[in-house]
Amino acid sequence: MDAHEVLILITGAHKAFALYKAIEEGVSHMWTVSAFQMHPLVTFLADEDATLELKVKTVKYFKGLMSHHLQLIEDNIKC
């Protein structure tokens, strides 16, 4: 947890349960990736297949964050 910034890449349906445990469940010693919930600067990057185990509202929430972030970047470029 000493890293300044962390990027976690999760791809494929075979990793969908791990992504679920990392994001939607609480921090657990059984799923050490869940400890990154406590990190101040972590990015989870997942493909569509890796989101299969997530709740629909979780996927919509993160897609909404992404579109908002992209809009902010676009607005800054125009200035």
Image (cartoon, rainbow, N blue to C red):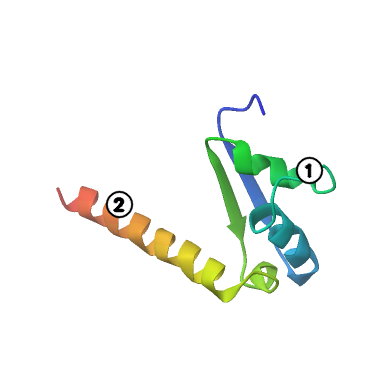
Q: Is mark 1 on a helix, strand or loop?
A: helix
User: Which numbered dot is residue 12?
Assistant: none
Q: Which residue is drawn at 30% across and 52% down?
A: 73
Residue receiving disc 1: 32
Residue type at tag 1: Thr
Identify whether 10 is placed above or below 53: above
* Left or right, residue 56 beside residue 16: left
Residue with the most extreme left position: 79
Q: Residue at x 70, y 62 (%)?
A: 20
Residue type at tag 2: Ile
Q: Residue at x 65, y 69 (%)?
A: 54
Q: Are marks 2 and 1 in contact (CB under 8 Å)?
A: no
Circle 2: is it few (<14), some (14-19), or many (20+) Cα within 10 Å?
few
Select label 2 or label 1 by which is in front: 1
User: Which numbered dot is residue 73?
Assistant: 2
* Left or right, residue 30 beside residue 53: right
Q: Residue at x 41, y 65 (%)?
A: 64
Q: What element carries label 2?
A: helix
